[in-house]
Image (cartoon, rainbow, N blue to C red):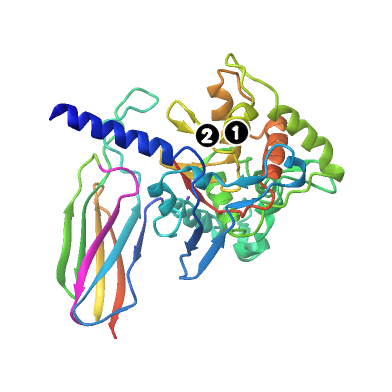
């Protein structure tokens, strides 16, 4: 009924040229580890976000490999150096093949 | 060397214990998702009916560690906001049998501003004590033609989170006189009744011993102005009556059910103990 996976990103709207800014990225996701059993005694199949990337104007800022020990709704906070205006592109890769994306513009000034 | 390390560790523990013994003096200003800031009243003079037992009422926020308190200062860091977002999607979705949505009748969720601050309250027409959950289920069953939502189910708590957020920063102000008086008296009686094999009442912990530790738990005043709250332990959202279930269970009693008349009356009484504190929308606790 309601889609359970939803990316949320917080970036500053603008930065001085060369400034290092803090970025916060969270995605709501169950991060089912694949090691838990359901009520019927069978293993619940693994379904996690296995990779998260952030690019600024096509240049990679961070590329994270994620394993099952990461808990539900994974949240990353990291820094990026902004040399020119443009946009941040965030991508989350799901075990089930889904790819979730979000884009945030950033201005210089 | 080993002995020195032990001494340092012991000293650290002792200091931490001292620092945590009472509610921390601190102020809560929340940076909202839209960039605005909201000042939250987390300490207020006790309401009239509590004057002879305490001078001040404190939000449970004051009893949590620095890191937990910090999570509530920024909406982005508050994991409860994920549930508010889900509630908003549900609000706008045509989920009713005839394609009805919450937004169809009530427009934006802002129309619910103030509701969380004054519930539980007595419905004038039916004379029933209504919580936010009872209002939601009334709409779901009577106007949307659906099965009632599980009182503590995901849909209900997402919606509860969304509706509570609309009253964030408003002072809790539940009525305890008039039609509400008999419910309030019943809630008060439950509050002071000892339950379970451990024979503990709400007051045993949250009135007589607030600020102290019960094993590893730092006892707060048991205020519910922050509910529904994101509980780190559960990695999920928790409603006030769900918390009551947990508390009564811990006294080794058979508990009342969430949504029962008993717990709804208790919710009114406990809410009234926090009259004057701000609704926190979706708080963060551990």
- Judging from the image, what secondary structure is the residue with disc 1 in? helix
Q: Is residue A83 above or below residue A67?
A: below
Would residue B234 be visible to someone looking at this image?
Answer: no
The image quadrant of residue A81 is bottom left
What residue does disc 1 label?
B206
The chain to which mark 1 is attached is: B
The image quadrant of residue A34 is top left
Q: Residue at x 55, y 63 (%)?
A: B39
Q: Give x and y (percent) for residue B46.
A: 69, 46
Q: Residue at x 31, y 61 (%)?
A: A24
Q: Residues within 10 Å of mark 1 (few under 14, many from 20)?
A: some
Q: Give x and y (percent) for residue A69.
A: 24, 39
What residue does disc 2 label?
B219
Q: Give x and y (percent) for residue A58.
A: 16, 73
Left or right side of B178 for A66? left
Q: Residue at x 51, y 47 (%)?
A: B61
Front residue of this view, candidates B30 and B75:
B30
Instruction: State the extent of the magenta-drawn residues as a range.
Output: A70-84
**Residue B92 painted magenta:** no
The chain to which mark 2 is attached is: B
- Judging from the image, what secondary structure is the residue with disc 2 in? loop
Front residue of this view, candidates B247 and B89:
B247
Q: Residues within 10 Å of mark 2 (few under 14, many from 20)?
A: many
């Amino acid at each position: 009924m309601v889609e359970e996976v939803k990316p949320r990103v917080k970036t500053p709207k603008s930065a001085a040229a060369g400034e290092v800014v803090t970025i916060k990225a969270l995605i709501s996701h169950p991060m089912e580890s694949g090691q838990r059993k359901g009520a019927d005694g069978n293993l619940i199949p693994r379904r996690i976000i296995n990779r998260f990337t952030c690019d600024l104007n096509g240049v990679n800022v961070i590329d994270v490999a994620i394993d099952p020990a990461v808990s539900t709704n994974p949240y990353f906070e990291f820094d990026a150096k902004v040399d020119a205006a443009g946009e941040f592109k965030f991508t989350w890769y799901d075990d089930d093949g889904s790819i979730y994306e979000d884009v945030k513009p950033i201005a210089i000034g | 060397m080993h002995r020195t390390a032990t001494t340092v560790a012991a000293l650290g523990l002792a200091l931490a214990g001292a620092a945590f013994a009472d509610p921390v003096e601190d102020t809560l200003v929340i940076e909202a998702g839209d960039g605005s800031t909201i000042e939250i009243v987390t300490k207020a003079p006790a309401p009239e009916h509590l004057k002879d037992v305490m001078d001040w009422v404190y939000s449970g926020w004051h009893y949590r560690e620095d890191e937990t308190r910090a999570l509530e200062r920024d909406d982005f860091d508050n994991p409860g906001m994920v549930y508010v977002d889900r509630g908003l999607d549900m609000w706008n979705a045509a989920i009713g049998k005839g394609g009805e949505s919450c937004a169809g009748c009530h427009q934006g969720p802002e129309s619910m501003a103030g509701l969380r601050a004054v519930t539980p309250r007595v419905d004038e027409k039916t004379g029933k004590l209504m919580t936010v959950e009872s209002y939601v289920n009334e709409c779901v069953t009577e106007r949307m033609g659906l099965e009632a939502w599980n009182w503590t189910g995901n849909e209900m708590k997402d919606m509860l989170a969304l509706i509570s957020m609309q009253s964030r920063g408003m002072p809790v102000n539940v009525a305890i006189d008039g039609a509400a008086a008999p419910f309030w008296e019943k809630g008060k009686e439950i509050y002071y009744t000892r339950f379970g094999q451990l024979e503990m009442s709400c007051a045993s912990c949250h009135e007589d011993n607030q600020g102290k530790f019960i094993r590893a738990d730092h006892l707060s005043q048991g205020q519910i102005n922050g509910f529904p709250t994101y509980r780190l332990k559960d990695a999920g959202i928790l409603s006030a009556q769900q918390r009551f279930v947990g508390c009564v269970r811990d006294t080794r009693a058979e508990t009342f059910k969430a949504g029962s008349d008993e717990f709804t009356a208790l919710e009114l009484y406990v809410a009234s103990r926090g009259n004057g504190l701000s609704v926190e929308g979706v708080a963060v606790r551990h």
